[in-house]
Every structure is written in C-alpha cells, then in structure tokens.
Amino acid sequence: MNFDIQLPDTLVADLGTTQIATTAAKIDSMRVLYFGEETPARYLLCSIAGDIYVYRPGVGFEKAYASGKPTAVWNFEVYPWGVSALSPLGYPGIYALARAGTEPVFGISLLGSWTGILGKWKNAPRGNMLRSWKNRMIVAGHGEHPLRLFYSEIGDPEKPEGFGNGGYGGNFIDVRLSESDSEPITWLEVLDDALIVFKKKAVCVFLDDSTFAFDRVSQVGCEGRFQSCVIGGRVYWVTREGVLSTSTAGDVRLESQNIEPVFDQTYPDVQYKLKARLSDLAIRARMSVMPEGRIALALPSLFDSTGGCRHLYIGYPLLRKAGDPRNPVMPWTIHQFWDRRVSALAVYRESDSDVDKLVAGLQEGTPSTPSLAKLFTGTSYEGQGGASSGGGYYRCGWKGFITDEPFERLRRVNMLMRGKIEASAQSDAQVFPATPMESGSGGTNTEEVRIRPETWGRFHRIALAPSTMAIQAVILKGELVFRGGKEHT
C-alpha cells in the first residue's frame, strides 16, 4: 500500500500486490516483448540465476537457456528486424548478453510462439550491456576493454564478425575523457536519436553514428546497469548524488536530493531525500518507467544485511515545479516492503483487456518463494501495512518555515480525508512517537480530522500510511499549524 499523488493535489492509497507466478530463484533483470498485430504475443524475458527464462500468460515460466553460470545477469535487447537464420526477416531479433568469466554470448529469437534459442550470436563482443541505436547494435561492458564501445554494421547486428579488438573487428571507439581516463562504461540508454553512454563520473551524448563524436554533459554518471529510464523526452538515472535527468540538449537537472549512506532514527529526512546502502548500489538498484508518467526506483535498504531492495521510491516528474526555489526537485512517495525485496522491475500487461502494470521480481521473504508480482493492484499485501510496521507511506519533510527562529513546534496537522491512516511526525530534536497516531473513522464519507504531533526542532518530517485496506484512504487537503520560538526546550 503506497500513497499515490494524483493531480491536482490528492493523496490516494494504492492497493496491494498480486502474485503472477513463482520463480526458481530471484529475477535479476527483465525485458518485455510484444509482437504481432491482431493478437500480439506477450513475453517477459527474465534472467534468473544465470539462466534465461521466458514467461508467457497461461503457460508460466519456461527455461530457454541454461548458462551454468549462476552469477551471470543477462541484458536483453530487441533489434527491429531479423537479418539471418538466427532471426529470419520479418521477426524481431532478440539478443542477450551476459558476462561471467568466459561466459559465451548467445542470441535468441521468438517466432510466433516460443521456440527457444536457435543459435549462437556468432563472435559477439564479450560485453554485458547492449542497445539498438540507429539500426546498429551497440555493445559495452567488455571485461578486458571496459572503456570500449562496440558497434555493428548498419542493418546487421551480427556483423562484422571476428574477435579482433574485443569484437566487431575494428568497429569500436574507446570512450576516453582524457589521456589518463580509465573509468569503465557503466550503462547505455537511448533517448530519441541519441545514444547515452554512462560512466560513474560522466554522461556522454552521442548523436552521430558515423563519427561517434560525443559531448560530455554531466560529471555525475550512473552507478550500474538497469538504473535508468526514459520519460517525456528526458532520461533519468541513479547516482550517489540522487536521481538526475537530462534531455539530448544536455540540460542536466537534479530530481531528488542525495542518497544518504547513514540512517539515524533521531534525524529526519530533508525533503525528498533517498537512502540506500551505498556499497550495494551499483549492482542492486533498479529503475523503471511506470504507467501515468511515474518513475519506480528500488534501492538497497540500509537495514537489510543482504543488500536487498526493501524500499521502492515512486517519483512524479509531472508534478515537478520547474523554477520554484522552494520545490526544486520532483516529489517522491515510498513503498517499504516488510519482508520482501525487489530484484527487478518492468511495465507489463498480460492481455489486451489488461492495462499496463508495474511488475517486480520479489526475492525470498514472506512468502518464502521468489515470485513475479504486479505491484499496487489487488487486495492482498505481501508484508505488513502502516508506518509503524514497515508498510508503504507518503513522506515529506522541510527545514524551518520561520528561518530566524532556532526551533519550531509542529502543533497540528489538519486533513480533509476519507478512510483511515496512521500518521507519524519527527524532528531533529525528537524521535517518532512510540505508537503512530490513527486518524479517520475508516468510512467512505469525507471528514475533517486533526492530529497533534507537538514535535519541535529545526527539521521536520511527517509520514502518512493507510492503516487498513478495507477502505482506500484518500487525503484531499492538508494543513500544517506550527509555532516558532526560542522557549521550546
């Protein structure tokens, strides 16, 4: 249960989680594939424990390829059309790359119905990331050539053949920002006609596939694979500085505040800050576009010893107030899993009568079996709801409204709402109440409710969570009443 911000200014509690199917192990990456016109085939390609699985509605998961390398994580890409026996003309070419030591690289093809792997992708570069751009296949992530960007011939992702220089013969450039630059490429993305190449300390925009000239537009890059998405003419990505975005023009902007490495219960989060275990950020974090122009970001949780992502942040680019100094970044809501971990994200619909839903690979927890699940839909919740027990909640924070006073006291929070919620308040001088305050009668009628936090300090945070799934909680209006003064001790 997560609060969703709906235009213009309403908070609505989303529904629960619906399990689609169980899996042999956690899903590390996913790629959706639709093809066909009247009754399109709907496949979900998944990397699970180093093997390639395909999910089909009504059939479930089928293993397409066993790599024997459980640490391999496959990156899938769809090429516009096939050009060889591997992917006959008229059908999409599905290619996959992974790197685990000497792991071989294969291509797979889907022909009307799932037929498995038809053959090897001959002499493919030994990378672990790929993108189709301007009718070329772009590959990076080679273990011995981490700066190298490989590119195929136009119209044929399998040529030129040959392992010279790491693959694709002489078709490559080294993305080097200086003579001493040794920083590897971390991820690839395509935005309109541009190829976006990420390093940890750089974002490079390529527009010309003949010269491969590029512009460096940012000194803060992406941490790792599967950590970007494209919405509304901008690409968003994950960094230790927070979430950033850019258009092809290179107008980089901050979309959240920094991701903090330390969690302290006695200190609130300044507005829209994200928190994560930084040591696991590069390999664990996942980002995906969501329906209705939202962003889903799974971050490794500080309190999870396995580095799993128990926190799912939902960003709202459409609600970002450009040029407003009081609100320079987009708002975020938070879904906190009690005993599950998000390992992969995608947007998928199982049938023509269905609508796009955010789906996730969920790791072991309660229940103990890994699964593929639709999030924010259905009537069940895998975990415990409410702010006190680790469910989903809406959170916002601020630094003192009365800036010339050392402290402020948050006296009341007034709301016009339906349903029932739990509310918690926190400041840098006081911790959460032992028991969150419940508000609302739980009915369907709109009512005015009031809570009295009486917390004081310079920084404040309030968290709101639905306390029942019987009635969907809706907050139509909120009002904060506070008081400044040095006597608050």
Image (cartoon, rainbow, N blue to C red):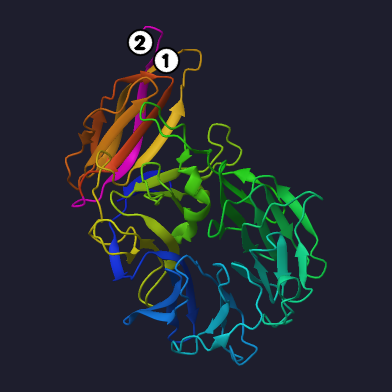
Q: Earlier in the sequence, mark 1 or mark 2?
A: 1
Pointer 1: residues within 10 angstroms few (<14), some, or many (20+)?
Answer: many
Give coordinates of residue 329: x percent, y percent.
54, 40
- Name the kind of residue labelled 1 in the image: Phe
Q: Position of residue 73 (x, y in %)?
A: 50, 66
Identify which residue, 301 or 409, lies in the foreground: 301
Q: Position of residue 100 (x, y in %)?
A: 54, 67
Q: Is residue 94 visible?
A: no
Q: Give the range drawn in magenta.
A: 469-488
Which quarter of the picture shows residue 350? bottom left
Binning the other alpha carbons within 10 Å of mark 2 as few (below 14), some (14 to 19) or many (20 upward) gives: few
Q: Which residue is drawn at 69% across and 83% down?
A: 156
Is 224 in front, or is 49? 49
From mark 1 to mark 2, how far is it between C-alphas? Answer: 7 Å
Residue 488 numbered mark, or none: 2
Left or right: residue 105 compared with residue 360: right
**Circle 2: residue type:** His
The residue positioned 42% from the left and 86% from the top of the image is 39
Residue 217 seen anywhere in this rendered image of the structure: yes
The numbered disc on residue 407 is 1
